[in-house]
Amino acid sequence: MNVARSPLVPDPSARPWQRRLPPPALTRYVDNFLFMEMPAGGALPRVLPGTGALCLFLYRAPLAVAELHAAREHSMSQSFVMVNRHEVLDLSTAGATECVVISFRPGRLRYFVPTSFEELQDHLTPAVDLWGSRVDDVAEALSRATDFDARVDILSEFLSARLHEEREARLDRLLDQLYLTPTLRIAELAESAGWSVRHFERLFIGTYGVSPKYFARVARLQQVARRLALEPTCSPGTAALDVGFFDQPHFIHELHKLAGLSPTDLAHGMRERPHFYNPKAIQRYVALLKTLSD
């Protein structure tokens, strides 16, 4: 299968990391592919409670994943899937490493795996547990590839072969609306689909593993974090007000409840470490949602 290659998306980070958009057939499921190269090791991104999912294909040194508040550390030597909903995780590596990260759009990982979000969330799941020994073959092929374009082709073909038939497209569209505008009222979303609030909440939890209200809270926190990562001069308070928090106390309370962080902690974590945020992600997400709604 020949997969059309997509253009490079510039990354404002000083690190020599590369991004690629997914091929057209995967656009509604995958946000981007990221190639991380760490010649001497060091800090990798901080992962806040989130709405999407990441798959990290490792093919050199292992990664350390530290749970910030639980003070536990995991050494990941094999490729793994991360569906983080409630933890603050710091990634790092002690030596030179290379890694390709697949960033899935919110809710879309389920089209590629036989396991529910409820089972996957807040775990570091070995990719081999989801996709079998083929994962080892892919990791080996990635390690032999000579450029990032070839690696994107390998992963795109791997994902395309595992893409399940779409289902619950209407529910996905509601999730997308909530992700982009987390201040929307849950009752209004349910009504737009012709469902009662209780029925909508039951479908949402059964499909995505968390309630729509919790998803919206985390999406809004992620909007603040993204702004801090991509706009170094923006203050946490300004970013919080811009995305719909009532005032500074409301933001501080939510941040502490969801992530156990202060605004200063949040800003430092986004600015003193590299990050996974794609500067073009929101614009592309809005454009995608419009095409699916037309």
Image (cartoon, rainbow, N blue to C red):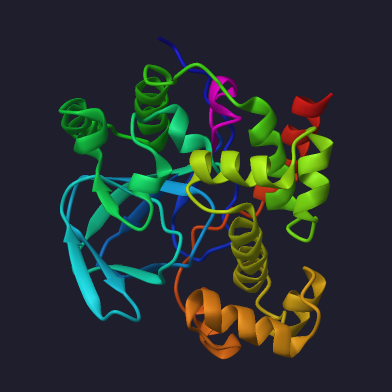
Task: Give the farthest residue toward the top.
Answer: 1
Identify which residue, 218 or 21, lies in the foreground.
Answer: 218
Residue 227 sits in quarter: bottom right
Q: How many marks?
A: 0
Indicate the quadrant containing the C terminus: top left, top right, bottom left or bottom right: top right
Residue 86, above or below 199: below
Q: Where is residue 203 in the image (x, y as percent from the top left)?
A: 58, 38
Residue at 54% x, 83% y: name it.
Answer: 256
Is residue 293 or residue 276 the one in the foreground?
A: 293
In this rendering, is residue 220 above or below 293?
below
Residue 133: image location, x then y, percent = 15, 28
Question: Is 33 placed left or right of 230 in the picture?
Answer: left
Task: Give the answer, above or below, for where 119 lies relative to 228.
Answer: above
Q: What residue is shown at x 72% (from left), y 84% (from top)?
A: 250
35 displayed left or right of 248: left
Q: Does the magenta stretch include residue 210?
A: no
Q: Which residue does the image show at 50% across and 16% down from the upper left?
A: 165
Viewer-side residue, 180 vs 204: 204
Q: In this view of the protein, can residue 200 be seen by the observer? A: yes
Does the magenta-highlighted stretch encompass residue 29? Answer: yes
Q: Position of residue 105 (x, y in %)?
A: 55, 41
**Would you place residue 56 above or below residue 89 in this image?**
above
Q: In which quarter of the image is residue 117?
A: top left
Q: Which residues, given as a range, are shown in magenta?
A: 22-32
Q: How far across and down, in percent of the image, does residue 260 sit?
A: 48, 82
Question: What residue is at 51 percent from the left and 59 percent from the top?
Answer: 50
Work out which quarter of the rendered image holds the N terminus and state it.
Answer: top left
* Side of 62 where 246 appears, left or right: right
Can residue 32 be seen by looking at this rendering? no
